[in-house]
Image: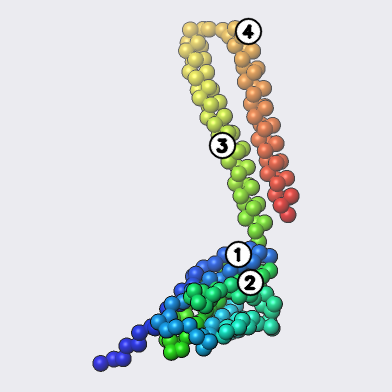
């Protein structure tokens, strides 16, 4: 018979975390142990850059917190957990794009030492890019939806006029002065619509430039 080892210590962490440059990020890690918490409990967080097999220790806990004092995470890792509540979370201050990568949370609470090691993929982006996209999307809705409605209405009106003209041409009907005036008004409305589209395009360009 094979030997089966039951996990006496279960650890959980978020598989994916998204953060923004300059805004504190919390990496959550929780654990559940069958043994009571003692001063022998240890927590270790490691970091591995993208497309690399090299890992570095960024945080160690055993009764006290020991954040890294070297490397890219120097003075930027802080304790955000509570071992008595099964919380082994940490926070990263002033994150940058270079912080993207894989983080691992390992907990040992002797005699509970057999456990899984969950990993968290961190993605840091510029918040300004997201704001720009949201702004452009909003302007698109406010500009193009009403424009589409106006175009549909104009097409319907033109269709009705075309049908009416065909009937009148068959009977040799001539336009009255009022109908000629209506045609002039229609041309002015079309010109106004064209100027509106140009102005909306200028607004979009201006919003894009201000974002950067």
Q: Nearer the viewer, mark 1 or mark 4?
A: 1
Residue at the image point whose x is 60% and y is 38% from the top: 142
The residues tagged by marks 1 and 4 sit, at their Cα atoms, a distance apart of 67 Å
Residue linked to disc 4: 177
Q: Quadrant of residue 201?
A: top right
Q: Nearer the viewer, mark 2 or mark 3?
A: 2
- Measured as percent of width and height from the top left, residue 2 is found at 29, 91
For marks 2 and 4 on the same chain, the one whose residue lies earlier in the sequence: 2
Image: 44 above or below 192: below
Q: Along the horizontal axis of the image, is 79 left or right of 87? A: right
- For the residue labelled by badge 4, is the local secondary structure a helix, a strand or a loop? helix
Residue linked to disc 1: 19
For marks 1 and 4 on the same chain, the one whose residue lies earlier in the sequence: 1
For marks 3 and 4 on the same chain, the one whose residue lies earlier in the sequence: 3
Residue linked to disc 2: 92
Residue at the image point whose x is 47% and y is 85% from the top: 109
């Amino acid at each position: 018979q094979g030997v089966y080892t039951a996990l006496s210590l279960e650890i959980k962490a978020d598989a994916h975390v998204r953060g923004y440059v300059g805004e504190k990020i919390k990496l959550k890690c929780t654990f559940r142990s069958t043994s009571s918490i003692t001063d022998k409990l240890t927590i270790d967080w490691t970091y591995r850059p993208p497309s690399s097999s090299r890992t570095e220790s960024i945080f160690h806990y055993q009764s006290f917190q020991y954040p890294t004092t070297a490397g890219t995470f120097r003075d930027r890792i802080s304790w955000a957990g509570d071992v008595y509540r099964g919380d082994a979370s940490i926070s990263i201050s002033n994150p940058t794009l270079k912080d993207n990568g894989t983080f691992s949370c390992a907990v040992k609470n002797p005699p509970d030492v057999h456990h899984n090691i969950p990993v968290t993929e961190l993605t840091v982006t510029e918040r300004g890019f997201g704001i720009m996209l949201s702004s452009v999307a909003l302007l698109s809705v406010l500009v193009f939806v009403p424009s589409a409605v106006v175009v549909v209405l104009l097409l319907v009106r033109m269709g009705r006029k075309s049908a009416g003209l065909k009937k009148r041409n068959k009977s040799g009907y001539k336009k009255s002065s009022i109908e000629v005036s209506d045609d002039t008004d229609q041309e002015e409305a079309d010109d106004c619509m064209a100027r509106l589209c140009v102005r909306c395009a200028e607004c979009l360009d201006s919003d894009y430039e201000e974002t950067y």
